[in-house]
Image (tube, helix red, strand yellow):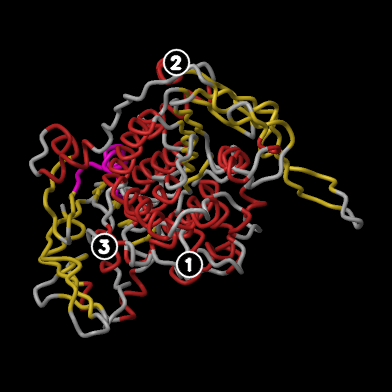
């Protein structure tokens, strides 16, 4: 029995110049009682605007629907429902979990108050009774020390805890339908698994129907009964999950599935040692006295020692807060540290800035890493302007165009600005900026986590190609075990600022020794 039916849904947006952009084009699907329906597709495929349209959350009248569009819930077309009817349904009959809980939770109110508020509105209970129910909900979604956490502000919680709070709010009124829009995208792999397990458990307990939206078909595989694959505003394929994976019909679906199969390690390692770290410590002050003396530290990196050979890729994996990014940033001099870091047997404290340029870094979010006021030529050329002032303007331009072609971009892109490119293209620009100085060691700090799964595969294959051609050494930092497996020769597992396990890729994946490593691998399967 269908609890929600979407028929011939079209969603259009009016641009400022008067043009019409069709975001969703005549799609139809249904949601059965007690079913988990996955909607998968890349950014811009139309999956999120489809979900938002169910509850009338699009920016009307800038957004508008085609004349034949129907979203039917309990016999009523929600697209023609009044504002009062939609307010009753939102959070009451249909709950919604957004992708980024920090943006969805009010930073000025304690979480207990925010959960209680939706209970008061829809169930007309007293604040005291609503608070009692809010506490029970926090316990139900697995928040530890729930009574104390009721008084916490959103910024005092981790990403996983904030997502659990969003789930508590969404199920507060025992909805018939729960819409989860990319609820695990920003989370570590182990937290991602916890959230998926929690949603499956709640779905069974409350007999809810769930629409689960993701750009990652592997995540959909873990939770959904049935899946709709979206591309360019259309549903190109829909079927049971088992059929989608075993007998995909559309080439796009096959591409999504194969995007995880990117293992292609061809580079040869040498015996030459390029990086040596001895007893590295990075401690950040937490508490100071009146005179500024530090009384308490957080040990972000604690006593780490590593050796890395030329042409080798060291994968560093761990959850958020494990210290992996702090370690990478310290190697390029972005953090103060104690201990020793040697590049080509030279202590980096004693080498020139030009010699230090042999180590470059590519950051997680290319949009924030690229100066929006500079065009692409200026961004990529900047390193040459600083370290190679002896080069002529023509020589610099030739080097810039060569490195742009190497990363798969065109000379005609040089006069454009960062906002004119997609996420994957911006990451290619960030890679070009790092490569222009011909580094020997490239630190890749979560370079694909902000990208769609197919774009991730493209960037990883590009990095593998560049490494093979240039014989580069990589430090590849990620919380994604699949990406780590695809890129690494050697893997360091970090937890609480320490390396708790270090070994070859095969040793770590086939014979993990630590329970924490085993959990990371199990969560990624």
- Residue occupied by mark 2: 507
The earlier-in-sequence mark between 2 and 3 is 3
Q: Nearer the viewer, residue 166 or 288?
A: 288
Q: Dividing the image into 4 quarters, which one contains the C terminus? A: top left
- Residue occupied by mark 1: 118
Residue at 72% x, 31% y is 339
Magenta-span inclusion, residue 433: no
Q: Which numbered dot is residue 412?
A: 3
- How far apart, in angstroms, are the residues tagged by discs 2 and 3? 46 Å
The earlier-in-sequence mark between 3 and 1 is 1
- How far apart, in angstroms, are the residues tagged by discs 2 and 1? 50 Å
Q: Secondary structure at mark 1?
A: helix
**Mark 2 neighbour density, 10 Å: few (under 14) some (14–19) many (20 or more):** few
Visible residue check, residue 422: yes
Visible residue check, residue 180: no
Choose top left, top right, bottom left or bottom right for residue 423: bottom left
Q: Which numbered dot is residue 515?
A: none
Q: Nearer the viewer, residue 465 or 404?
A: 404
Is residue 487 positioned above or below 282 on the image? Answer: above
Choose top left, top right, bottom left or bottom right for residue 58: bottom left
Numbered range of the magenta stretch: 214-227
Q: Position of residue 468 (x, y in %)?
A: 34, 30
Q: Position of residue 96 (x, y in %)?
A: 37, 60
Q: Nearer the viewer, residue 520 or 371?
A: 371
Residue at 74% x, 36% y is 338
Q: Is residue 358 left or right of residue 54?
A: right
Q: Is residue 250 left or right of residue 294?
A: left
């Amino acid at each position: 029995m269908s609890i929600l039916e979407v028929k011939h849904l079209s969603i259009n947006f009016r641009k400022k110049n008067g043009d019409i952009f069709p975001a969703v084009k005549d799609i139809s699907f249904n949601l059965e009682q007690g079913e988990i329906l996955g909607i998968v597709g890349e950014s811009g495929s139309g999956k999120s605007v489809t979900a938002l349209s169910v509850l009338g959350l699009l920016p009307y009248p800038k957004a508008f629907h085609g004349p034949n569009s129907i979203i039917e819930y309990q016999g009523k077309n929600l697209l023609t429902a009044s504002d009062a009817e939609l307010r009753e349904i939102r959070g009451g009959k249909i709950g919604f979990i957004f992708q980024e809980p920090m943006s969805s939770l009010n930073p000025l109110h304690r979480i207990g108050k925010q959960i209680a508020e939706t209970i008061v509105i829809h169930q007309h209970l007293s604040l005291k009774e609503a608070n009692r129910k809010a506490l029970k909900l926090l316990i139900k979604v697995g928040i530890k020390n729930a009574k104390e956490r009721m008084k916490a502000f959103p910024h005092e919680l981790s990403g996983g805890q904030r997502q659990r709070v969003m789930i508590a709010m969404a199920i507060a009124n025992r909805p018939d339908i729960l819409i989860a829009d990319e609820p695990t995208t920003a989370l570590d792999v182990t937290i991602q698994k916890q959230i998926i397990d929690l949603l499956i458990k709640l779905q069974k307990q409350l007999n809810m129907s769930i629409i689960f939206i993701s750009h990652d078909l592997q995540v959909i595989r873990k939770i959904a009964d049935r899946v709709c694959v979206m591309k360019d505003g259309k549903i190109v394929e829909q079927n049971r999950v088992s059929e989608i994976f075993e007998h995909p019909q559309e080439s796009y679906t096959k591409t999504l599935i194969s995007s995880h199969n990117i293992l292609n390690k061809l580079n040869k390692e040498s015996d030459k040692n390029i990086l040596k770290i001895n007893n590295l410590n990075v401690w950040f002050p937490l508490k100071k006295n009146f005179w500024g003396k530090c009384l308490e530290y957080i040990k972000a990196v604690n006593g780490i020692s590593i050796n890395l050979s030329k042409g080798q890729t060291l994968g560093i994996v761990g959850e958020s807060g494990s210290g992996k990014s702090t370690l990478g940033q310290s190697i390029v001099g972005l953090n103060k540290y104690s201990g020793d870091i040697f590049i080509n047997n030279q202590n980096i404290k004693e080498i020139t800035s030009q010699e230090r340029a042999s180590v470059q870094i590519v950051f997680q979010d290319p949009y924030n890493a690229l100066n929006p006021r500079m065009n692409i030529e200026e961004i990529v050329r900047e390193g040459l302007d600083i370290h190679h002032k002896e080069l002529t303007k023509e020589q610099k331009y030739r080097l810039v165009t060569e490195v742009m072609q190497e990363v798969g971009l065109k000379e005609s892109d040089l006069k454009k600005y960062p906002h004119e490119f997609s996420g994957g293209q911006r990451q290619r620009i960030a890679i070009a900026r790092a490569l222009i100085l011909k580094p020997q060691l490239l630190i890749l700090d979560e370079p694909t986590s902000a990208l769609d799964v197919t774009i991730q595969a493209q960037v990883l294959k590009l990095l593998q190609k560049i490494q093979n051609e240039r014989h580069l050494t990589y430090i590849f930092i990620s919380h994604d075990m699949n990406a780590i497996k695809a890129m690494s020769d050697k893997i360091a597992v970090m937890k609480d600022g320490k390396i708790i396990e270090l070994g070859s890729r095969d040793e770590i994946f086939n014979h993990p020794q630590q329970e924490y490593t085993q959990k990371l691998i199990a969560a990624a399967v």
